[in-house]
Image (spheres, rainbow, N blue to C red):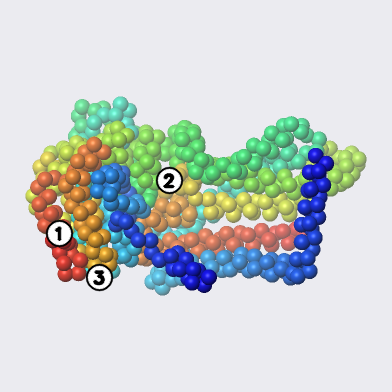
Amino acid sequence: MKKTLMILLGLLLAPIPAVTAELTGAGATFPQPLYSKMFDVYYKTRGVKVNYQGIGSGGGIQQLIAKTVDFAASDAPMTTSEGEKARSEILHIPTCLGAVVITYNLKGNPELKLTSDMIADIYLGKIKYWNDPRIQKLNPDVKLPKLVITPVYRADASGTTFIFTDYLSKAVPEWKEKMGVGKSLNWPIGVGGKGNPGVTSMVQQIEGSVGYVELTYALQNKLPTALINNKAGKFIKPNAESASKAVGKNVPPHMKVSITDTDSPDGYPISSFTWILVYRDLSYLKDVNKAKELYNLLWWIIHEGQEFATPMNYAPLPQSIISQLENNLKRLVFGNQPLWKI
Amino acid sequence: MENLKALIQRQSGNIIYRFASIKKLLNFDKILKISLFISAALVLGIVLGFVVTLCVASFDFLKSVGFSSLLKDTWNPLTDEFGASPFIFTTILVSSLSLLLSIPFSLSIAISLSDKKGNKLLQSFLNTSLDLMAAVPSVIYGFWALFTLSPLVRLLQTKLGFAPMGVGLFTAVIVLTIMIIPFSAGISREVIKLVPQELEEAGYSLGATRYEVIRSIILPQAKSGIIAGFILSMGRSLGETMAVTMVIGNFNAFPKNIFSPANTISSLIANQFNEASGLHQSALIFLGLILLVITLLVNLAGAFILKGSRR
């Protein structure tokens, strides 16, 4: 009797042997729809289940540092202090690109051109009306009304705000000095909406408002978007193609880099990579097969997985960086075994 | 049929017999005492656990910034400035304004619902609607406020010459008022029903009008309970998060006028907690602790008022 009980107890407590490796990740909500699609296809074709929880970039990084997930996803590269907490090298693998668009509520949805200075001045409260001479001069074809501009920002801390302010800090010295770069800022004017839907609903309701949202969200909801000038002086319409083109020729090999305010002449200037973050040494996973599965998944994402980006309004990685990315993935090891050789 | 009855009787007799034999073995008084003690201790333990957790998690913040943040007014996570005063002010302002606004409505609803001479059909209909209103999730109120109330507020703002934002302090106060009416009215209704009918009848027999009976007999009799109801609903409005976050405009500064966008403690936490880390997270937890203290003070004040009114 006792013996059977012991056996039963043992069975209950023993870890359930995994038939196939299961991978878990957590992080950014922006690429979540794309990842869900990718992981669904991956499960159907490769039989490996990937669980992804969109808890926000910061949360994903914290879980990666705590080693409770196999990979994290983030819209912003890890900060120096986060990197120190991890105590081991972390690779930044870009999976696709995102862009932040400027949307607005004006009668007749005219297509507007805006410069970085104007956007900064609107959010600093210096440009107060739509018929401001600077905006009117740049848009001679549109009759702009004397209407108060209400800037709408993200009330929740978000990667979208990070990309937006990163761009403004690079392009506008005054912004860098007064506001800075971050996921949530001390806004001097305007109203806050929660999430992309919150900002969008505020913009759609308040006549004369202006807001910034994710490109994918704006495309799905067919919002009016402003053309923004890039470093080359061209006004670029935001779409998946112009976001991909923001990846210039001088991307450093580690890819942990902001590409806002790009040098690339046809690139949309408020674009950014979104990354999957993994430890270079995956021996903490304790299971070499699992580490190999993770390596396979990442390899698949930067190759076959890319075809799912465009249909879902995400910007795919440009071909020019794929071979460098392959080299980066080959640096993944399990202890002292390179994973690509296993 | 008769057989079935007999069977049931026999069976139940059996059960009672067995029950009695167990009763001899166990001392139910003792068991009741122990289980009551455990439940009561658990409640106390959970509250203490909350306080300890909040204190421990906000320790980092208290060590490096401290209570001085309560007086500062700049909230900027980028520069590690965590001035809490605008949020504390807005929280108290929003909930007291909505409480004040709700008093006339709740009182009249409660009085008319507990009127023994009232139309019974109308009263039962109103009772059901009031209970339904209390059961509506706050996110629904938030949606309604964002899509129905805020356009109306925008019209008002345009008329009065304010920037037509539609969201802000005013919208939040209105939606909170509507949300707490069912609570304060519901409790007041129950209390007013407890006023002895003899007193009312005595009032009428002395020639008092309906209004005089309500003013000089019913309300003084039910005063303590009504106040308790209002304080409970203020507790609810202090911590209300979802609906407020959706319409208050989420602006981290002191409101300049009644239409300004602002932020309460709970809406700030709801907005920023998921991406916060380090000192920022600790600061938000500290604000949570402050909210707990405010709620506690409000409840204590309520208890004090109740005690005073009983004398």
Name the chain letter of the residue that bears numbered label 2.
Answer: B
Question: Can you say whether A152 is above or below A144 in the image?
Answer: below
Q: Amino acid at mark 2?
A: Gly
Q: Amino acid at mark 3?
A: Arg
Question: Can you say whether A147 is above or below B305 in the image?
Answer: above
Q: Nearer the viewer, mark 3 or mark 1?
A: 1
In the rendered image, which residue does mark 1 sit on? A340
At x 73% / y 47%, what residue is drawn?
A: B190
At x 76% / y 33%, what residue is drawn?
A: B120
Could you tell me how far apart the alpha carbons at marks 1 and 2 are, in whole angstroms? Answer: 51 Å
**The C terminus of chain A: image quadrant:** bottom left
Q: Which one is earlier in the sequence, the residue at label 3 or at label 1? A: 3
Q: In the rendered structure, find residue A87 and report the number of the disc placed on it.
A: 3
Could you tell me how far apart the alpha carbons at marks 3 and 1 are, in whole angstroms? Answer: 24 Å
Q: Classify mark 1: helix, strand or loop.
A: helix
Q: Where residue A188 sits in the image (x, y, percent)? A: 35, 50
Question: Can you say whether A321 is above or below A149 in the image?
Answer: below
Compared across the picture, whether A233 is left or right of B286 comes to left
Residue at the right extreme of this rendering: B205
Decide: few, some or many residues near mark 3? Use Cα within 10 Å; few <14, some 14-19, many ≥20: few
Q: Amino acid at mark 1?
A: Trp
In the rendered image, which residue does mark 2 sit on? B249
Q: Where residue B87 sits in the image (x, y, percent)? A: 46, 56
At x 28% / y 54%, what residue is drawn?
A: A73
Could you tell me how far apart the alpha carbons at marks 3 and 2 are, in whole angstroms? Answer: 40 Å
